């Protein structure tokens, strides 16, 4: 009889643990309360001199098809040379539900640029293949650069 009681207690503990884990996952959507500029500041410290230059929100909207009204902030940097695909985008969205739509738009841009550079700029094509696109709740991070991993690490720490 005692053995049966222990099994019941074990089962209840396991169920309680699963409920707790599900509750934590459901209530924590990721993202941050920080402004996009606060998140971007440590990332910008990792940029090398003349690697990219700051672009406007209108430039980001044009390049990625972003609806600016759906954002709390945008930080967009890109190289001024047409033959250089280096760019970085950090967007804080009003609604985390819009993140997948933006991620798809970014992936489409990367694919279009891969098709464009594939046959005549293999170094740029390789950078595009190694692009980083991540969603953290209501924030989307995208980077194509020789040091994209270092930029992404700085971004993760900033969250």
Image (spheres, helix red, strand yellow):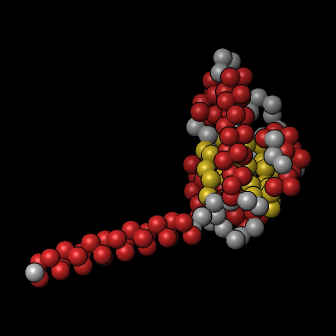
Q: Residue furthest top?
A: 119
Q: In which quadrant is the C terminus drawn?
A: bottom right
Please indicate whether residue 93 sits to the left or right of residue 158 in the image. right
Tell me which residue sits at (46%, 66%) in the image. 22
Please indicate whether residue 13 sits to the left or right of residue 116 in the image. left
For residue 39, which quarter of the picture? bottom right
Tell me which residue sits at (57%, 68%) in the image. 28
Q: Is residue 153 above or below residue 53?
A: below
Q: Is residue 121 above or below residue 141?
A: above
Tell me which residue sits at (89%, 47%) in the image. 58
Q: Residue 42 location, x and y as percent?
A: 68, 63
Q: Residue 113 location, x and y as percent?
A: 71, 29
Q: Residue 101 location, x and y as percent?
A: 70, 45
For residue 74, which quarter of the picture? bottom right
Q: Is residue 150 visible?
A: yes
Q: Is residue 146 visible?
A: no
């Amino acid at each position: 009889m005692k053995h049966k009681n222990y099994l019941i207690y074990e089962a209840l503990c396991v169920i309680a643990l699963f409920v707790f884990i599900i509750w934590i996952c459901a209530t924590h959507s990721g993202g941050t309360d920080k402004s996009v500029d606060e998140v971007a500041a440590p990332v910008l410290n990792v940029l090398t001199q003349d690697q990219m230059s700051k672009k406007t929100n209108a430039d980001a909207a044009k390049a990625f098809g972003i609806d600016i009204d759906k954002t709390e902030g945008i930080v967009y940097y890109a190289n001024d040379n047409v033959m250089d695909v280096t760019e970085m985008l950090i967007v804080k969205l009003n609604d985390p539900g819009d993140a997948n739509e933006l991620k798809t738009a970014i992936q489409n841009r990367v694919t279009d640029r891969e098709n464009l550079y594939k046959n005549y700029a293999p170094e740029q094509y390789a950078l595009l293949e190694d692009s980083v696109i991540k969603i953290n709740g209501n924030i989307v991070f995208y980077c194509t650069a020789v040091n994209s991993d270092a930029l992404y690490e700085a971004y993760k720490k900033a969250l």
